[in-house]
Every structure is written in structure tokens, then in C-alpha cells.
Image: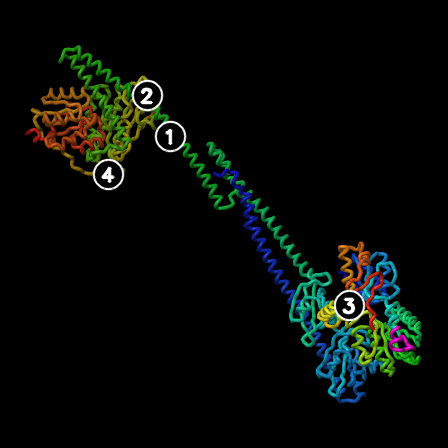
Amino acid sequence: MKVRDDLGVPEKALEADRKLIKAGAVAIIGHATSAQTLAGLKVTNPAKVVIIGATVSTPELSDLDDYFFRVNSSFKVSAQALAQYIHLNCAINRLAIIYDSDNAAYTKTYSTIFTDKFQSLGGEIAGEASFSSKAQPDFSPLLLKLLADKAEGLLIIATDNDTALIAQITRLMGWQTPLFSSAWAATETLINKDGQAVEGIKIEQGYDQNSKSPAFMDFQTRYQTRFGHASSFGTSSAYDATMLLAAALNKTEGKADGLKQALLEIQNFPGLIKPSHSIDSVTLNGPFI
Amino acid sequence: MASREDFPSLRQVFLRLVLFRLFLPLLVLGLTAIVGVGYLEEHNLEIQQYQIAHSMAQIVDHHLDQGGRILDAVARVAETSGTENLSLYMNSTWEAYGYFETLYYLNEDNKVNMLVPSDPRYLGLDMSNLPDFQLIGSKKSLIISRPFISLRTGEPTVYLVKPLERGGCVAGELNLGLFQAEIMNITGTSGMDFIFIMDQTGMLLAHPSSDLVKQQTNLGNLEIFQRGLAGKANAVYMSNGTRVLGSAALVDRTGWVVVDQVPWSIFWGSYVRILGLILLLALSIWLILVWNLRKQLQRYVSTPLEQLSRETNALTVGDFSQVNSLSSIPTPSTEFSKLVDDFRFMSNSLQERETALRTIAEELSEADHRKNEFLGVLSHELRNPLASIQSSLALLDRSPPGGEQARKAMNIIKRQISQLSSMVDDLLDITRITQNKIKLQKRTVELNKLVRRTVEDYDLLFAQKKVCLEAEYAPSEIMINADETRLTQIVGNLLHNAVKFTNCGGTTRVCIESDNLHKQALIRIIDNGTGIEPEMLARIFQPFMQADMGLDRGHGGLGLGLALVKGLVEMHGGNVNVFSAGLGKGSEFCIQIPSDDAIIEKPQVTVYQEISKCSHSVLIIDDNADIAEILGELLKSIGYTVEVAYNGSEGIVKAREFKPEILLCDIGLPGMNGYDVAKAFRSDQGLKDIFLIALTGYALPEDIQKAFDAGFDRHLAKPVQLETLEQTLAQAPVKTLAG
């Protein structure tokens, strides 16, 4: 097992992948974001090194005959499901969207898919705002503008920290609009930092935190014991990715040759929550809201 | 028996000794010491590691304590002052302390009421969902939160939260970079330590790689963390593919775990280097030692032993010429020096012994040669008288009895018999002397008188050969303690020798002197006869030695006279010397006899009762019929009644019938010997008083003693003169005759 730190940015992800390939890695598990994965594939595909994403959900990586696999679904489905849920279940027609442009591969695409679906259902995007998380922006002016657009709800596509801050600020502004979030922010940190603003926020995720699957419950228990806090979408997905790779390597006796084919041949792999499908870039977990 | 090939060479023995008795024990000892040193080194390293971790834990605790005190002060201000004063105080505190990323003042709903540095974006934020803030209501003391990423700065921090009495709290974001800096200080100093801090769950609080902290990496799976939670701990474990030695210390205030780890290779590498160096050094020393000892062994042990072996082989074949080369053998030790000395001594002894044996062999060869010559001489000397006796007996047969021719023949026979008897006596005497069996009958003798009598006895002989015999006696008496008979024999032999080797017209002079200084008497017999060759002087006293040993022997004799003189003189405690200037220049014999220890003894006087020669009966027992018959006839001719028997049994029977007064008995009889006969007579009531005389050729002192022990009254040696026999017969006790 070789570990390299991609530091959460695409450039470093590319460098980390290059180092792992040079070190003889037969497969790579990572990265956390779609943007990093898109960068890394520039070296892993030519090297024919399998890379399995645990949390990557961009549809840009779907339907490609390459060496990328993932254990969660493309957010295309979940974004559409969320749009449908907001429009039909919450009876919201005007929605504002704010997203983190630092991970545009995810956020911007997610926003577009969501918008398309939402509009196709008859909804209207009252306003859209973006920010760079790295710049530690003041969200108040952005939110005031969206508030001025008279949106009936706000969809936040950002990290847990930023989502928590945006949610709190909306409440501080007295804007009591319903809040929605993509799966990206579905962590314990969001709950901790969001204060009372977290009440009522609706999060889409291909992950059932309340699953009663024996495998998931056992995993949760062991994770809590090991790390002192509850597991998250990212951790359980990383576990599934690791087990999937191990199963494929068993078939190839640990060798890189034939690993892609071995992964393609695996059907109904028993994930923690429900069977995962690794047919190219399509894996169906969820969505849950 | 094992062959030589079964034994190892000295070199192999030495190598085995050095290898198994020196090197391997040293190696084991060295390895044991290395293991021991390694254990102590590792133990010291563990202690040092723990001390570093413990120091770091104390530093962390110190910072937390300091932060807590500062928050206490801020809380007191918040409790007692207005908002404006609190703002001022929080600003000054934030600036002065520097380690708080942000200072918060939260209202009763745990919403941000005030923060330093000021940032309106965060005013009013609800922090009530943070797990550690939820303890505010139940806990009044300082709360230290789990690490998290600051909402405001995005840096890893922990909250120090001080609840207020009236609700709400003051909180400080303690930048974990503080601990990061402390870690870098320590690791920068030691150069090999790798320190990191984890909270109770294993989440990193500080680490040389700050990114891992930002990513909230959890290292709870490390063995050292699990053991560290229980207190002081050390462990060797794998970290990022590297084996490391870690020590953990607990921060008492929070239960955080501080770990100091070093790559095991640092310890092990240095240990292996030391081990290698020691082994290399040990091997080098051993090789040098072996080489040096082998060289020394070769020089001081193997080579000398091989040389000694060669010398031994040389000695085995009798080659003593190489013994001198022993001095070239190096003798590095006392033991080896002694061995070489002993070997040299043994070699010299062997050489001397062989030389002596060679000399003895030569002497024996010469003695054997002389013995053969002597036998020739003896045969010659015996045949001459026997021839004279035979001729005289023939003349007696043809001559009328009582005539002049018969008388001459009888004289010749007597003279030749006397000469034969003298030769036999000499032979017996020389045998007795060499066997030390002559017992001297010493008494006080006046030397002048004794020599005078002897000279008178030889006057006629000297006169017959027309050699002048002169005597010069000492002016006063010289008393010596001597056997008169033997001393007479000594002087007589020398006079006989002088007359034999002095030609007609020559002179022989006898001188008696007293050497008072040395308390000895001197007898010199000087002649101007044929003299003695210088080379003969040293051997002249040896038995069977005569200067003239050729076939044309002009002087006769067995060559025993001078040997008897030497033997008898030495038995008297004296010595005899001979001087001669060479052939034709005469000779001088000088006898020295001690005179100081003369013991005055009364001459033993044997009183015999004179008896009449008439009416005596004698029984003769002898297995030699001729001797028995002639002796019987002879005794009859002088008036004895005689019976003859030829063995012991017959003799006893005849004695009982004949009742003799005297028994003449031979010793060497067939069946019952003479001793048994005597015992039988003494044990027989009818025979026990008969006067028993042994007449035998067994004449050695022990033979005589045995005869007396068996019961004989007298002992006579064959041949016996008639006069001697008559005197002995006359000594028979009177009472016997009276019967």
C-alpha cells in the first residue's frame, strides 16, 4: 500500500498519480473530487492503471472506455432526482443556486443538470451565484442578491464548511427559505457547524446514513471504535472501493494485467448498503434525500 | 594401538585450542556483550524517546494551561464589565497572547456576540451544534474541544471554552500550529526524532507534515497510540512502510497522546555497524594472534621438537656427532631448556656408557685372550712336573730300591709334587682374593723378624742361582697387625719373583723401613734383573700376566704371584708399587703396610696333646679307590690299623664293625656325601665319639665351616703332606685312644 497526498487540488492529484505509477502501483483508489480525478486520468489512462473513485460523481466520466471506475452513482441521476423532489414534493417553483467554483467539474455540472431538470419540470431558477472557497468570501452580498431575486428555496452546492456558513448566514439575514444541498456537504461537520440553521436542510446523497444493512451497521460500529466518530458517505464509499479492488486483484492474482477486465466482470458486488454495479462509470447507490 | 596418523599434529592441536578454547569462547563472550550492550542501548534510547515525548506532553499541557488562564481572565472581564471593556480586553489579550486564532464571546444561545479579530461575517453565527459547546450547560470548568478546522481561518484548531456564570461563554481557537512549531523546535534539535500529537481518538493535532493535520488524519490504528492511551509506552512498529521505535506520553489534562518515534534503522544501523566493527576487530585480532602464535610455535616448539626428533634418530643408530647441534636449538622456556639439557645429559650419558661398554668389551676380549693364553700356560706348567714325575717313576721301576738313582727320582717327584701343589694353592688363593673370601688371621707381628725368616728360607734358592741376596733391616722393631702366614707369602712371592728374573751374578736387596710420618712400614725388594717394559708396569699385577708370555717361556709359573701379592697387601690395608727403568735395568717392588693400628694380641697357642703313634685304627672313606688304597697303605706303613670304604653307607657299616678311633672322610661322595656321613656318625651312639677328619678338595672357607658344622673335628685340603696328615692324626683326643 502506497499513500500519496493529493492535497485536494487537481495539480497535486496529477503529481500524486504520477508518483504512484512510478512506484509500481497496480491500481489507485482516489481522488475525492471530480476535478482532481479528471486531472489524474491524464496519467493513469495512458499508463493503463485502474483508478477507482470513491466519491467522484461527475457525469463527465460516465460512458467512457477508460481505466476509471467508481462505486457511487453519477450525480446526474441524483441531481435530477433532487430537482424532481424539490419541485414536486416541496412545491417550489423558484429556486436560487449558489455553488463553489473551485470544484466546477462537480458544482457547475451539478448546477446545470439540476437546472435543466428543474426547468424541464416547469420550475424557474431565480438566481445563481458562485464563489471561490479558497478566497474565504463574504457570503452576505451573494445571499442578499439571491434573496432579492425572491427565490422560494436555496440550493447550496459546496463543501460542508461553506454550506454550514451559508446556511447560518441566511438565517442571520432572516431569510428563512428552505435550504437544499448536494451530497458533497453531507458530513458530520455540516451538522456540527450549522447550528440551528441545519434544521430543515434537505441533502441529496447516494448513501443511506440510516441503513440497517448488517454490513453497514458493522462497519459503522467498527469505524466509530476506530476513529471516534461516525462514518460518512466518503468513508463508506472508500471502503466499498477498496473491497471492490481487492476482489478484482484476487482474480488477477495481484497483477495489473487483466485488472480492468476483472472489474468489468464483477456484477452485483456486495457494498455496505446495497449491491454496487461497476459497469464502467455507473454505480447505483441511492439517491436518498 | 593407535598409529601415528591417528593423532593430530601439534599445529592442528594448537589451532583447535586457539579456535575452540580461545576464539569461540571469546566470540560468544563478545556476542553476549554486544547483545547486552545492544539491549542497554535500546533501553536508553527508549528512555530518551520517552523523555522527549514526555517533555512535549508537558509543553502541550503548559500551553493549554496558559490558554485556560487567559480565558479565565477574559471570562472574569466578561462577567464583570460591559461590552466595550470586554472588546478592548479581548483585543489586547488576543494581540498579547498571539496563540489564539480567534477569541469568541458567545451569548446564552451560543451565538457569536463578539469575536477578535473582528469580522462581521461571523457575528451571530450559531455554534450550539458543535459537540464540545453542548457541554457548556453542564460544565463550568475549561472545556477543550476536539480538533477541527477553524470556520474562520480554515486552520486546524481546538477550542478552549470557558462557560460564563450568567450563560454563554468565551472561547478561543488555539491554533495547533503552536504545537507544530514546538515539534519543529525539538525535531530540529535532535535531527532524528519524529514527533506528533493525537487526540483521544487518534486524530492528528500536530505533525511534522501539517497537511496531514489539516486533513484531520487519524492515526488511531498505530500500536503506539493504543498503548500510549494506557500511559507510558514504547513499541516497535511499522509506520509508512518503515520500522520505527516509538515512545508515547499522555497529556494529563486532555488525554492526548504525544508520540516520539525514530526509524529503527537509526538504532539498528548504528548497532549493526558496532557489531560489524567488533566482529571485524575480533577476527582481525584472532587472525593476527593465530599467525603470530603459529610463527612462535613453529620457531620455539615445532622446529626444536623436530630437531630433537632428528637427534633421537641419530642417537638410535649410535651417531653422537650431532649432539653438539643441540646448542643451536632455541630454548625459549625453562621447561624446554631443561628438556634440551636433559636430552644432552642423556646423550652424553649414553655416549659415556657406550664408551665404557666398548672398553669393557675390549677388556673382556683381552681377558678372554689372556684366559686362553693362561690355559695354554697352565697346561704347559702342569705337564712339565707331570712329565718329571712320570720319568722319575720310570726310573724308580728300573733302579734298585734305596740306591742313588732311586733317591734322586724320589727327590724329583717330591719337588715336582710340591711345585704342583704350590700352583694349585696359588690358583685357589687368587680365586679367594677375587671373591673376597680370604679371612686374614691377624695378630701382632714384628716385621724385621718375619722378613728375616723368609730371607733365610730363600737363601738356598738364591745361592743355587748364584744371585746375591742382601737384607737391610730397620734399626728398631716394627710392629704391625698382619696375618703372619700371608705376609710371609707376600715377601716370599716377591723374592721368588726376584730370583726368577735376576740373572746369575745379579743382586737382590731387601730393605725394611719405618715411615713414622705416615705410620706405615715399607718393604722394598730391589733387583738388577731383567727389568720391566714401561707398558707392562700398569698391568704387571693383573692375574695371569707375565712379561714373557711367549712360547719360549724361560721362567715358568702361572703369572699369579704378583696378583696374589697385590691382593694380599690390599687386604692388609696397604699397597704395592713397582718401579723399573725398562728392560735390563732391574726393578723395585715397594710394599706399604699400615703400622699405626697395630693391635697387640696374644698369639693364639694351640695346645695339642701328644699321643703315641702306636695302636691307632683309622677308617678311610673315599670314592677314589686309588687315593683310598694308597692312603691306607701309607698309614699302615707308619703303624696305623686301616679299613677302607668307598661310599658313605658302606663306611657307616664298616665303622660299626671296625670301631675306628679316627675317620678320614672325603666330602664329594656318591649318594651320602661327607657332611651327611659326619652327621650320621655324630647321631650314632656307637660312633659319635670317633675323631672325624675331612680330607677333601673342597677347601674354601665356607667349605671348611660346613665341615665343622656337620661334625668334623678337623679339615685337611687335598693333596696333603704326610707330615701334615701325621700331625692332624696325632691331634685325636686321648680318651678316644683309651677306648
Q: Position of residue A52 (x, y in %)?
A: 81, 62
Q: Given the image, what chain letter belongs to the residue carrying mark 2?
A: B
Q: Amino acid at mark 2?
A: Met
Residue at image x 61%, y 48%?
Answer: B287
Q: Which residues are magenta?
A: A83-97
**Circle 2/circle 4 CB separation < 8 Å:** no
Q: Secondary structure at mark 4?
A: loop
Q: Amino acid at mark 1?
A: Ile
- The lab-note entry on whether marks 1 and 2 share a chain reads yes
Residue position for label 4:
B596
- Disc 2 and disc 3: Cα gap in Å? 147 Å
**Circle 1/circle 2 CB separation < 8 Å:** no
Circle 2 crowding by C-alpha within 10 Å: few under 14, some 14–19, many from 20? some
Looking at this view, is B237 or A103 the one in front?
A103
**Does any portion of residue A52 appear in the rendered image?**
yes
Q: Quadrant of the C terminus of chain B?
A: top left
Q: Is residue A86 above or below residue A268?
A: below
For the residues carrying marks 1 and 2, which lies nearer the camera in this image? 1
On residue B549, the disc is 2
Circle 1 crowding by C-alpha within 10 Å: few under 14, some 14–19, many from 20? few
Q: Secondary structure at mark 3?
A: loop
Q: Amino acid at mark 3?
A: Ile
Q: Quadrant of residue A260?
A: bottom right
Residue position for label 1:
B360
- Disc 1 and disc 2: Cα gap in Å? 22 Å
Residue position for label 3:
A273
- The lab-note entry on whether marks 3 and 4 share a chain reads no
